[in-house]
Amino acid sequence: MQSSRITPHAPGPVQRDSIISEMVLEGGALVLADKGICCIDEFDKMDEGDRTAIHEVMEQQTVSIAKAGITTTLNTRTTLLAAANPAWGRYDVRRSPAENIALPAALLSRFDLMWLILDKANAEQDRRLATHVMAVHKEGKAPPPEGCLEP
């Protein structure tokens, strides 16, 4: 399960079922990923309410719902892979990961692993990468390595 929603833990909308005329709850990304992997991009963009709720998800592997007359607890036994961006556009090695990502240390501590992918500014390497990506999208294949002739 992959999600770029700002509210990945959310159980989903509560709607009136047209057949049974009762309120029904749909599972959100983490509920649907139960016993699987949920990948969440833009984890740092989560609002405060979602951050509070995701503590339960990461610690208890459940999410508690009290919405539209429905009160229940749903399983979220999932591996969570989250990606976040530096708070100031670039990672500052003089600051802690919690400061750089602008997420509470209590939330970051719930992850078993955390690794950094640092973008070191290099104009030549960035040019080669951009040329490669553009060629793949334009030509449908990777260009030959520099200095090599096409067959």
Image: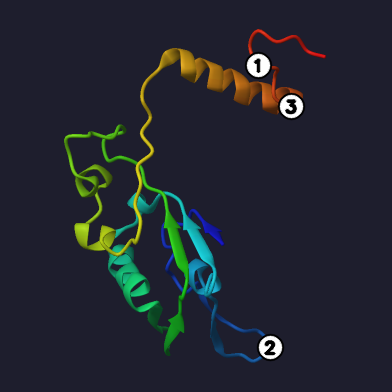
Do callouts 2 and 1 mark residues in contact (Cβ within 8 Å)?
no
Do callouts 1 and 3 mark residues in contact (Cβ within 8 Å)?
no
Q: Give the structural element (helix, strand or loop) at label 3.
A: loop
Q: Residue at x 62, y 22 (%)?
A: 132
**Residue holding disc 2:** 19
Counting from the top left corner in percent of width and height, residue 14 is at 50, 78
Q: Which is in the foreground here, disc 3 or disc 2? A: 3
Looking at the image, which is closer to me, 50 or 58? Answer: 58
Q: Residue at x 35, y 51 (%)?
A: 45
| Disc assigned to residue 141 | 3
Do callouts 3 and 2 mark residues in contact (Cβ within 8 Å)?
no
Disc 1 from disc 3: Cα separation: 12 Å
**Residue holding disc 1:** 145
Q: Quadrant of residue 129?
A: top right
Q: Amino acid at mark 1?
A: Pro
Sequence-wise first label, 2 or 1: 2
- Tag count: 3
Disc 3 from disc 2: Cα separation: 50 Å
Sequence-wise first label, 3 or 2: 2
Q: Give the structural element (helix, strand or loop) at label 2.
A: loop
**Few, some or many C-alpha atoms within 10 Å of disc 2 (few <14, some 14-19, many ≥20)?**
few
Counting from the top left corner in percent of width and height, residue 145 is at 65, 16
Q: Residue at x 27, y 58 (%)?
A: 108
| Disc assigned to residue 12 | none
In the picture provided, is 48 more to the left or to the right than 139?
A: left
Q: Amino acid at mark 2?
A: Ile
Image quadrant where one finds the C terminus: top right
Q: Quadrant of residue 22?
A: bottom right
